[in-house]
Amino acid sequence: MTLTDFNPIIETIEEAYEIPHLNATRRISALLPHDYYTSNKHYPVLYLQDGQNLFNPMAQFGDWAIDKSLGKLAEEGKADVIIIAINHGEKERINEYLPYYHPRFGQGKGTFYIQFMTEKLIPYINEKYRT
């Protein structure tokens, strides 16, 4: 097998996944282990923010190359994890992540973001994938 044989399977879950807690939508993607569809394993899940930067060589703020890192880890037998990539809200990014009032950014919406994660996204991922 070559290193590319171990690269994760990248799926777009939805281009505009509804976040009613923020009255917004976000692109949500999944990076699945390379053998996800040929195994019966269950996997832990890692939820990562700033999805635009995780595996896009053309990303405005740089490519963090999570897909390539997972491929290298999988080759070593260490990448049994599902990563859920959630794009940030562009101009609203900081405000959506802040859980408190900030003099420069205003009242943070981080509490609503966490509610979205725990009440909507995590249960959805647990139903859709073998977690």
Image (tube, rainbow, N blue to C red):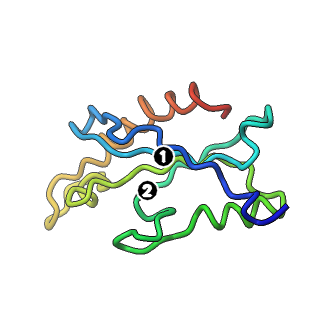
Residue sitting at x 81%, y 62%: 75
User: Hey, which quadrant is residue 78 in on the image?
Assistant: bottom right
Residue sitting at x 69%, y 58%: 7
Cβ atoms at labels 2 and 1 below 8 Å apart: yes
CA–CA distance between discs 2 and 1? 8 Å
User: Hey, which quadrant is residue 127 in on the image?
Assistant: top right
What residue sits right under mark 1 in the picture?
29
What residue sits right under mark 2 in the picture?
51
Q: Position of residue 19 (x, y in %)?
A: 30, 36
Please give left or right for residue 76 compared with residue 88 in the image: right
Label whose residue precedes the other's in the sequence (2 or 1): 1
Q: Position of residue 89 (x, y in %)?
A: 27, 53
Residue nearest the viewer, comparing 81 with 59: 59
Q: Is residue 4 above or below residue 121?
A: below
Name the residue furthest bottom.
62
Q: Position of residue 53 (x, y in %)?
A: 43, 65
Q: Residues within 10 Å of mark 1 (few under 14, many from 20)?
A: many
Q: Residues within 10 Å of mark 2 (few under 14, many from 20)?
A: many
Helix, strand or loop at label 2? It is helix
